[in-house]
Image: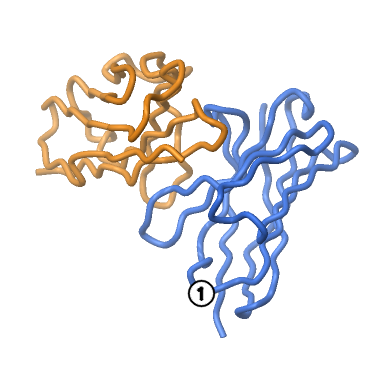
Chain colours: A blue, B orange
Amino acid sequence: QVQLVQSGAEVKKPGASVKISCKASGYSFTTYYMHWVRQAPGQGLEWMGIINPIGGATTYAQKFQGRVTMTSDTSTSTVYMELNSLRSDDTAVYYCARRSPHDYWGQGTLVTVSS
Amino acid sequence: DIVLAQSPGTLSLSPGERATLSCRASLTVASNYVAWYQQKPGQVPRLLIYGASSRATGIPDRFSGSGSGTDFTLTISRLEPEDFAVYFCQQYGSSRWTFGQGTKVEVK
């Protein structure tokens, strides 16, 4: 069965960086693009970007351009999302989601940014 | 980027009633690439509808999607207790995907 398993919760200080992993299993990793979506507490869903697991080509939402980096490791079927210069309003649950439309989601990773 | 506006923000209905949720795009969505997701508290979003009107695997037929261009609708024909949740639309017809802000369907 398809599974996307994300790394655990993180607590970071403002200005720091966070890198979250998403390990895929149960399907051919290189077949589908992967997306990252975040959700601030009590808020809606926000699309962050997409990565092609073959070659690593990315497209980011304009809001995150220059601050986010998405990478892929085909040897471990894992994608990563790194967000830099963290602010308090980056506190959110971060999800990886397979393909478009998003048929499978990771369990989410809570990132808390607090001094 | 295409902005999606969902209405109403909250829909208060009773079980058995019909729910009609709207999603309006700021620009035409190419190929009617609109999806709808359901999210319950503490849970991951679940794909309900894609391509504006196709039900995802395992989704009951009381859920239906319609619309084209800039106006899209999710209809729940008869609300079941498990349908009370937040619903998000998403467009994936442009180079950058976007979500609507969500509609909460609550028990009246």
Say above or below: B101 vs B89.
Answer: below
Q: Give coordinates of residue B48: x percent, y percent.
A: 40, 26
Tell me the residue at 62%/33% (across/down).
A98
Name which residue lies at 38% across and 29% down.
B36
Q: Nearer the viewer, residue A53 or A76?
A: A53
Q: Nearer the viewer, residue A1 or A22?
A: A22
Q: Which residue is mark 1?
A: A88
Residue A115, compared with residue A83, is above or below; it is below
What amino acid does circle 1 point to?
Answer: Ser
A18 vs B37: above or below = below
Q: Position of residue A69 (x, y in %)?
A: 72, 53
Q: Tell me if residue A31 comes above or below residue A40 in the rendering.
A: above
Few, some or many residues within 10 Å of mark 1 (<14, 14–19, 20+): some
Find residue B80 and report its image quarter: top left
Element under disc 1: helix
Picture coordinates of residue A91, whole percent (x, y)? 51, 67
Quadrant position of the N terminus of chain A in the picture: top right
Give the image quarter of residue B13: top left
> Nearest the camera: A4 or A101?
A101
Q: Image check: A94 left or right of A70?
A: left
